[in-house]
Structures are given as structure tokens and as C-alpha cells.
DNA sequence: AATAAACCCAACCGCTTCACG
DNA sequence: CCGTGAAGCGGTTGGGTTTAT
């Protein structure tokens, strides 16, 4: 009975300014901890859990309030999410002024947005269907070659079509970030960079390479992640991100991937990765339409026509969400 | 101007981990 | 060891705000 009454005394819902002030004063005097004593001392009718959350997410100093994630923050979130998974608290430690809740909300919103854009871009355009193969082969091999050489030269410069690469050695992952202003065929960006000073105790060793002659108009994330444990990093041998594995479901055909061979699944999945990995904010800000971006992505991957031979019309309609050459 | 859709984010819930008696 | 409570974390929800139609 006592417990029941105690539960009824617990206040929920939005915090008032007065409650915030009481909590701030408590932390000022006692430090951020012993949250449950706030209620047991009768200071606030809130659970310790609620008090802690309020402090962590809203009241603690140095929080970035009311400003959107920057492109750099976005890049960090995407890179770390790919490496760490949904470890929001861990990811937030790399983003000063951001909480795990911030990162979580950012990611969640972004995923919804991607899903919406994916749907929106799925409008049927049969004229472009089945035309993926012709112009893309060379670019795919270019990327492949670049990845291989990058593996070997690491710290020196190299020529390729990719303008921005991120190499997280401890995570056994390389993130390739090709901004669309490198789209022009034949444009070779000189990539050079040196490993930044790294405190191995506070941050994972990371080599960040930026283009010398390109300031990406659409900054990362736009990436392919793969394990360096793969003996030969090749486009058709990349492990999929989880969201790629889920892509079949996104297409409205849960068994889509299952209908394909593993090799085909990998290719489609990585193609989808491109689609899902766009930096939407900046992409939209540039005013570029998705057709252009999709054209670009076409140049990065080869999708054999045979892939589509056995798919239903509905599935093909959905696949229009995936980049396809307009030529 | 009205309405719907999308976005944003505060706060809750449930689960796991950890510390302590 | 075991039980219990606190703290921490990730998932989810709901409501307010902004943007698009």
C-alpha cells in the first residue's frame, strides 16, 4: 500500500522551470549522482531515473542546444554507427555537446527520412529499367583498383576518382566517401593525406584523407564499408551493412534478397548502400536532384541485367529506388 | 487559411549491468 | 553466492513545431 501510494506520488511528464532549478541546485551541491535521494529527500516528486535523464539530456553544461548536427557530426555518427552499431552512448563520446539521446534521435530521424526518400524515388520509370550495365563497368573497376592501391600506399598520395577516404584501422574498416562533384568521368582527384596525431587512449587510430583539389559539395556520409579481413577488397565481395540486408524488406518484398544468389544479393545490397548512405541535408541544400546522384552512383557499380530477369514488376518498380543509369 | 505530412526532441519504458550488503 | 536497488543504455512514443500542399 505504501509502495502504491509512493508510485502515485511520482510525477511524470514535462519538467517545469522550478523543477529544473531544484535539480540544478542539487547537482551543484552534491554532484551528478545519487539521483534517487532527490526524491527520498522530498526535493522533487521524480524518480532518480527521471532526474538523471533530465540532467544528462538537458541541464548539464556545455550541451549543444537547438542546433542541428553539422556535416562533420553527421559523418562521425555514420562512421561510428557502421563500426560500433547502435552504441549511442559510445558514439556520443566522440561528439562534444551531444548526448546519446541526441545521437539516437538524429539517427532515427535520418533513417525515417531515408526511408521516405527511398519511397519517393521509387516512382516507376520503366524507360530506365534494365539499362544498368553499359557505362558503369569501367568506373566500378576504377573504384576497385583505387581501393586496392589505397591499401598498399596508405599515407602517400594516389590518383583516383574518390575524393575522401576514412580508414579506421582498429575497426578493420575503410570508408570511401566519393562526393558527387567528382562525378565527371575522367576527373581524377589527387588524394593525399597523412595520419593525424592520435591519442590511442582516447580515440581510435584513424587515417583521414581529404582531396587536395576538391572541396566536396556534398560531404560524407556516402560510403562503402568493408572489412580489411577480406583478402581482396572488391566491390562484389563486400559484406553488407545490416540496413542493406534489410533492404529487401524496404523494397516491399521481404524475400527479395533470398530470391537472388549470394553474389547478386551482395551487389544489390551494396548498390542499395549507396542509396541509403547519402548526405541528405547537404544534397538537398545543393538543389541537385536525385536523378543526378543516381546517375553518379550508376557509375560506381555494375548491375548485370540478369539480376532483374526473374523479378516481378512490383519488385522492379521498387528497385527504381536504386540508382540506375539513365543512358 | 486550412490541413496534412514531416520533423524534432523530451521523456518514458524495459532491460542489463554494477555495486553493495 | 544471492538478492536488491541504482545507474546506464537503447528502443519507443507522443506531442509540439515546421514545412508542404
Image (cartoon, coloured by chain):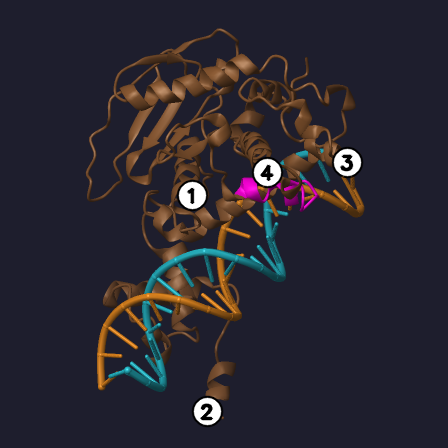
Chain colours: A brown, B orange, C cyan
- The residue sitting at 47% across, 37% down in the picture is A239
Label 4 and label 1 in one chain: yes
* Disc 3 from disc 4: Cα separation: 24 Å
Label 4 and label 2 in one chain: yes
* Disc 4 from disc 2: Cα separation: 49 Å
Q: Is residue A106 above or below residue A132?
A: below
Instruction: Read off the residue under disc 2.
Output: A2
The 10 Å Cα crowd at callout 1, few under 14, some 14 to 19, many 20 or more, is: some
Q: Nearer the viewer, mark 4 or mark 2?
A: 4
Q: Nearer the viewer, mark 1 or mark 3?
A: 3
* Disc 1 from disc 3: Cα separation: 34 Å
Q: Nearer the viewer, mark 3 or mark 2?
A: 3
In the visual, does A81 lie left or right of A326? left
- The residue sitting at 49% across, 44% down in the picture is A106
Residues drawn in magenta: A243-256
Q: Is residue B5 above or below residue A288?
A: below
Determine whether the residue tagged by mark 2 lies in a helix, strand or loop. Answer: helix
Residue A17, image quadrant = bottom left
> Residue A324 shows which numbered tag?
none
The 10 Å Cα crowd at callout 3, few under 14, some 14 to 19, many 20 or more, is: few
Query: What chain does badge 3 belong to?
Result: A
Instruction: Read off the residue under disc 4.
Output: A114
Any magenta on residue A18?
Answer: no
Instruction: Read off the residue under disc 3.
Output: A312
Determine whether the residue tagged by mark 4 lies in a helix, strand or loop. Answer: helix
Q: Is residue A70 visible?
A: no
Please provide percent x and percent y for residue A265: 59, 36
Residue A37, image quadrant = bottom left
Pointer 3 or 4: first along the chain: 4
Amino acid at each position: 500500500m505504501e509502495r502504491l501510494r509512493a508510485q502515485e506520488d511520482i510525477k511524470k511528464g514535462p519538467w517545469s522551470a522550478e523543477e529544473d532549478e531544484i535539480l540544478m541546485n542539487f547537482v551543484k551541491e552534491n554532484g551528478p549522482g545519487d539521483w534517487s535521494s532527490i526524491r527520498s529527500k522530498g526535493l522533487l516528486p521524480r524518480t532518480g531515473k527521471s532526474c538523471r535523464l533530465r540532467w544528462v539530456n538537458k541541464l548539464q553544461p556545455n550541451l549543444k542546444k537547438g542546433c542541428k548536427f553539422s556535416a562533420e557530426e553527421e559523418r562521425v555518427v555514420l562512421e561510428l554507427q557502421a563500426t560500433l552499431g547502435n552504441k549511442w552512448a559510445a558514439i556520443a563520446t566522440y561528439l562534444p555537446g551531444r548526448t546519446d539521446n541526441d545521437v539516437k534521435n538524429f539517427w532515427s530521424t535520418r533513417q525515417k527520412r531515408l526511408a521516405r526518400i527511398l519511397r519517393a524515388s521509387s516512382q516507376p520509370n520503366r524507360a530506365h529499367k534494365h539499362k544498368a550495365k553499359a557505362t558503369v563497368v569501367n568506373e566500378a573497376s576504377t573504384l576497385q583498383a583505387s581501393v586496392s592501391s589505397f591499401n598498399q600506399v596508405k599515407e602517400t598520395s594516389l590518383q583516383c576518382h574518390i575524393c575522401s577516404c576514412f580508414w579506421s584501422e582498429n575497426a578493420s574498416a575503410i570508408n570511401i566517401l566519393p562526393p558527387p562533384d567528382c562525378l565527371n568521368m575522367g576527373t581524377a582527384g589527387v588524394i593525399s593525406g597523412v595520419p593525424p596525431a592520435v591519442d590511442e587512449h582516447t580515440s581510435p587510430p584513424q587515417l583521414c584523407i581529404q582531396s587536395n583539389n576538391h572541396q566536396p559539395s556534398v560531404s560524407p556520409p556516402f560510403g562503402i564499408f568493408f572489412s580489411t579481413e577480406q583478402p581482396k577488397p572488391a566491390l562484389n565481395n563486400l559484406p553488407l551493412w545490416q540496413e542493406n540486408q534489410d533492404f529487401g524488406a524496404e523494397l516491399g518484398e521481404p524475400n527479395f534478397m533470398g530470391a537472388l544468389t549470394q553474389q547478386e544479393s551482395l551487389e544489390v545490397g551494396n548498390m542499395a548502400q549507396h542509396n541509403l548512405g547519402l548526405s541528405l541535408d547537404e544534397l538537398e541544400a545543393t538543389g541537385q536532384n536525385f536523378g543526378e546522384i543516381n546517375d553518379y552512383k550508376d557509375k560506381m557499380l555494375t548491375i548485370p541485367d540478369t539480376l532483374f530477369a526473374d523479378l516481378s514488376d512490383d519488385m522492379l518498380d521498387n528497385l527504381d529506388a536504386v540508382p540506375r543509369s539513365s543512358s
